Image (cartoon, coloured by chain):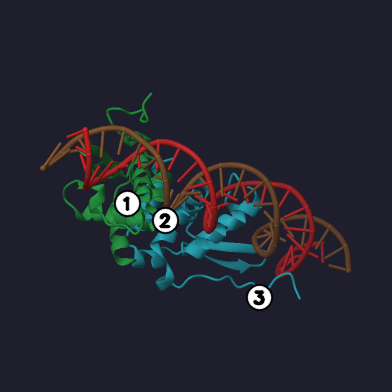
Chain colours: A green, B cyan, C red, D brown
Amino acid sequence: MSYHRNMDRTLPHPETSEIRLDQVLHALADPVRLQIVCDLAKASEEVACSSIELPVTKSTTTHHFRVLREAGVIRQHYKGTAKMSCLRGHDLDELFPGLLASVIEAARKNS
Amino acid sequence: MSYHRNMDRTLPHPETSEIRLDQVLHALADPVRLQIVCDLAKASEEVACSSIELPVTKSTTTHHFRVLREAGVIRQHYKGTAKMSCLRGHDLDELFPGLLASVIEAARKNS
DNA sequence: CCATTAGTACGAGGATCTTCGTAGTACGAC
DNA sequence: GTCGTACTACGAAGATCCTCGTACTAATGG
């Protein structure tokens, strides 16, 4: 039995219909994760975890990316040794129109 | 010495400039508080705590209203034995344009 | 094969949060 | 003054969260 249950390294994502507002708001209600979201919004392309500098260790970074993914805020997949992330802007806008944009806009101003 | 430190029952509110996005999002990231916010948004006038039915005890209700007030989401003041609450819609819109509206709109749909 | 790079799983410490019950205060009506 | 209503302060229990260190895997480049 391997250390990993997930040999092909696929990552579980909630369906768009499964995304809950509570969880999205909770995911966004953390300064580190807000910074991640802002950086992803700034980047046009998908981005490797390691390319975003955060004031926490790598373990903690993994944790925050997972919270964002499991809430449905970002989509992730492996590309070689890197793990690429991007916002689920379209999915979120379908469910909660304008929400992500206003949070990002607010985060830019407020710290 | 009285049980209360605050004999005239004034309630502390953050200045508009002191409102932090983190705290607002955290305050909104709870089903009970989201329901409060939606009910306040629906009501045109200010509303007594007791007029909003919640699936928690009165102690817990007090707690949730306080979280919302301290985050800057609602404004509260006493009127007789009742405690009136209303959204700080204008203040929030100044700081974070569109945010409250999109959250409320999203909450109406999503549960 | 070996070293390096990028990320993870697991466990633990400490902080914070949600919920409640109990006992209490403030106000208004009688 | 007495009673009822509305709300609060103060714990405390239990859950969840953020953070980290350690030990690990998986892919890439010599």
**Rendering coords of residue D28 (x, y %):** 15, 39
Label 3 resides on the chain identified as: B
Quarter where residue D11 is shown: bottom right
Whole-percent x, y for residue B48 in the image: 59, 59
The numbered dot on residue B37 is none
Say what secondary structure mark 1 lies in: helix
Residue at image location 41% in from the left, 59% down from the top: B22
Residue under the point 45% across and 73% down: B15
Report which quarter residue D9 is drawn in.
Answer: bottom right
For marks 2 and 3, give the CA distance: 31 Å
Residue A99, numbered label: 1
Observer-side mark, 1 or 2, equals 2
Instruction: Find disc 3 in the rendering and name its residue.
Output: B8
> Could you tell whether B37 is left or right of B63 in the image?
left
Q: Residues within 10 Å of mark 2 (few under 14, many from 20)?
A: many
Q: Is residue A88 in view from this perspective?
A: no
